[in-house]
Image (spheres, rainbow, N blue to C red):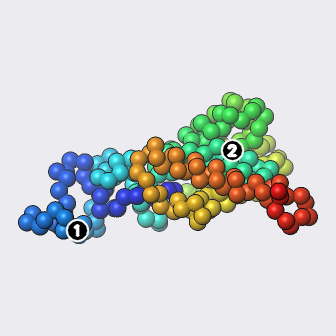
Amino acid sequence: MLEAWASMKSFRPKSASGEDPGIGSGEPAQSRRNGEVDFRKTKRSNATHASTTDKDACLYRKGAGQESRLCYLGHALMENRNGLIAAAEATLATGTAEREAAARMSERLPKGATLGADKGYDAEAFVEDLKAREIKPHVAIVGTVSKHGLVRKTAVPPEVAASLGYAISQRLRKRIEEGFGWTNAAGGLAQVKVRGLAKVRAVFVFAMAAYNIVRLPKLLMPKGDLRPAT
């Protein structure tokens, strides 16, 4: 999740006149401040509201119980052997963006490859698309239980889930969080400093490329040698 360079106060009804709430009409333009707005019990969605400072930013929350924020989504494809980022892109923050981006980035994978992913990708359409392209879906099984006590059906074939390769992929896939963590802490992308999807995509891909460059000296270092490679 890439927090947008836009305040929640800028997220206003699309039909609004554009006037800043809470600002006196007699104040000089240069002395105006953001008006105070009470968002309690008001319904806001991307269908009815938009940011006045970043029209591409969408209201999104990562999971239940978390607050909604104006943001974009960053996606990455990692190779398992060395943990390097093989592909990256940023998209609008929608409920299907993660699977759609994964489907696009996985198009470059050869037949017979495996693709590890978390529980959010355990969807029939996504898994069937991988199978049609002869890519083994090493996707984490959701396994959630409904209020009626029924376990949600998984789209991952039983023979795949029981394989040794599946277990290895599930262990290694978590390394992708290292790339995301680096872009937030060292890459300065905890909140992007640009506006618009094109610019956000550019800085995210650049940050992921920089992450690879930072990792390469360690990968090139001879085993047992603590000195940096020359």
Left or right, residue 23 beside residue 143: left
Q: Position of residue 17 (x, y in %)?
A: 17, 51
x and y percentages locating residue 30 in the rendered image: 19, 64
Q: Is residue 60 visible?
A: no
The residue nearer to you, when weighing 165 against 163, is 165
Residue 219 can be seen, yes or no: yes
141 over 31 or under it: above or below:
above
Q: Residues within 10 Å of mark 2 (few under 14, many from 20)?
A: some
The residue singled out by tag 2 in the image is 86
Chain-order first, disc 1 or disc 2? 1
Of residues 98 and 145, the one drawn nearer to the viewer in this rendering? 98
Q: Residue at x 78, y 52 (%)?
A: 82
Residue at x 17%, y 56% (from the top left corner): 19
Element type where label 2 sits in the image: strand
Q: Identity of the amino acid at label 2? A: Ala
- Element under disc 1: loop
Left or right: where does residue 193 sit relative to residue 214? left
Q: Quadrant of the C terminus?
A: bottom right
Q: In front: mark 1 or mark 2?
A: 1
Asked whether the residues under the numbered discs 1 and 2 touch, taking CB atoms below 8 Å apart as contact, a structural biologist would say: no
* Residue position marked by numbered label 1 in the rendering: 33
Q: Position of residue 177 (x, y in %)?
A: 65, 59
